[in-house]
Amino acid sequence: MAGISRDQVVHVARLARLDLSEDELDRFTVQLGAVLEHVAGLEALDTAGVPPTAHPLPLVNVLRDDVPAPSLDRDEVLAQAPAAEDGRFRVPRILGEAP
Amino acid sequence: MTGALGIAGDVRAGRRSAREVVEEHLAAIAAREDELHAFNLVLAGEARAAAAEVDRRVAAGEDPGPLAGVPVALKDNLCTRGIPTTCSSRILADWRPPYDATVVRRLRDAGAVIVGKTNMDEFAMGSSTENSAFGPTRNPHDPTRVPGGSSGGSAAAVAAGFSALALGSDTGGSIRQPAALCGVVGVKPTYGRVSRYGLVAFASSLDQVGPLAGSVADAALALEVIAGHDPADSTSVAQPAPSLLGELDRGVDGLRIGVLSELVEGVDPDVGTRLAEAAAALEAAGAKVDDAHIPAARLGLSAYYLIATAEASSNLARYDGVRYGLRVDGDDVTAMYGATRAAGFGAEVKRRIMLGTYALSAGYYDAYYGQSQRVRTLLIRDFEAAYESYDLLLAPTTPTTAFPLGAKTDDPLAMYLSDVCTIPSNLAGHPAIAVPYGRGDDGLPVGLQLLAPALGEATMFRAAAALEASLRSGTGASAA
């Protein structure tokens, strides 16, 4: 499973929503390949029957009473947005809407 | 300049004013900050105002708090309301959070004086602070060397006397490794000991906030203030803050301490020598010292770089140009996402998002991410087995002393290897403390670490204080 092709790097960049330059695609193909080669040792390990650990603490759901409390101030939050309008975040066109 | 305990004691007793203390530290910053670049932002005005408030409380006979007048530096991934919190990234360069991190609020309530936001590797991804979008921090012991990372600015600030304490975050060693390279104490608490509310997320199952300090006692004081349950963090352990200062003079008589063999292999000979001296000093102080084994530790680095990047690829999806931070416009929302993230993230962050996205992608998920999670279980089992025979484990913090700027920037894998000794504690969720222990052959600080089982901070601090004391008394042989 070691190694990664340039086409795979292009595909992963699309999944990650990163517009990488041709130069970055070349460099990451080499560098990610080297890292994947290093981690290949994991593959050989027999872990049959070993449960995965997603989280180091034996925590279960943390619940609280459903009591209304103040949340962040809307104007303060929207003041940090790149674009806001009418108390909402403004974004570019999403799908085939009229411009 | 005295340490945090000394400052708080003097200010509380009215022997020194908080104003005097803060001016002393601002003068130290003015003298050397241009050379070291420990800070992204120095908060001189805010610090003077906070010091004035502490002095007012003292004069009025009110309790000014356990950190009265103590200058503290904050890693720039801890949210400060209305004050820029950049994570040393272009994508957050102008962001002012609408709320304070829980640890920031606890520091302020304890009378601490926040002097600035420290430089770091972008989004805490790195081991040298060279991945900052705002330029590297330099090591106060030798400005041609790195301070370590990712909390390099915090470590440099304490080492240079810019602040008595600093907070950092430790996902794979990001507090302990720079502490070692800068010759200060650094603590990664048990996962869940300290609230992560308001810590900008990197890898949520590994991240933990902790203190950097000039001494074990100062680190204990800081951890007592910031630890303890926080309802705002659902992964916060439902336990009060541990009592640590009272443990420090109890000694190590009768403690069983294992030297972690797997983490000794591959370290530089001078680091190995300091470790052997530390083991001998602890034994001379009454501990029972032996070799311990964590076989799965060898696999920790690989498992870590898949788990941490997988979690990061998910956490960093929020930087999309919609709600905060940088936006680069595009014809539609998808084009805007791609252009914003391409312009906003630096090379290492892009590399890790790519690796994590790949590890989680269809066809590779089980082989990489799933297998890493199973290795994480094996590692935890190995630790549990070791802790049946030992109370604590002793290991190097880093394989080498501070390396020159630029030495590893073109070789990501070589950079990752400098975290090999610190990563196992993050995967296990266990606490560890890095303590300076003498110098290497190059005259630069060497750091050793004590590891403890979950929630074992009290015993860990007790042994750390004994280790520190052995240096002062000279029983640590050539280490001093």
Image (spheres, coloured by chain):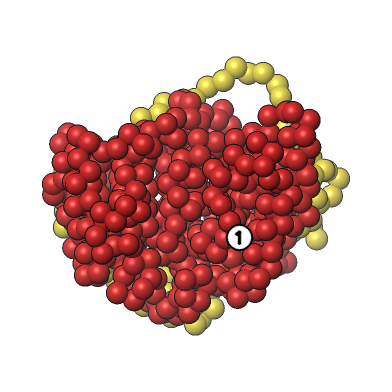
Chain colours: A yellow, B red
Give the image location of residue B457, x and y in percent: 37, 37
Give the image location of residue B68, x and y in percent: 65, 40
Which of the 4 image quarters holds residue B402?
Answer: bottom left
Q: Residue at x 65, y 65 (%)?
A: B29
Give the image location of residue B428, x and y in percent: 31, 43
Residue that lies at the very extreme toward the bottom in this rendered image: A23
Viewer can see residue B277: yes
When the figure is inspected, residue B131 is found, relative to residue A59, above or below; the finding is below
Q: Residue at x 51, y 81 (%)?
A: A22
Which of the 4 image quarters holds residue B43?
Answer: bottom right
Q: Residue at x 22, y 58 (%)?
A: B277
Q: How many marks?
A: 1
> Numbered disc 1: what chain?
B
Q: Is residue B421 left or right of residue A47?
A: right
Q: Is residue B300 left or right of residue B244?
A: left
Q: Is residue B405 left or right of residue B319?
A: left
Q: Secondary structure at mark 1?
A: loop
Check disc 1: other Cα within 10 Å, few if <14, some if 14-19, many if 20+: many
**Residue at label 1?**
B162
Viewer can see residue B422: no
Where the N terminus of chain A falls, by quadrant?
bottom left
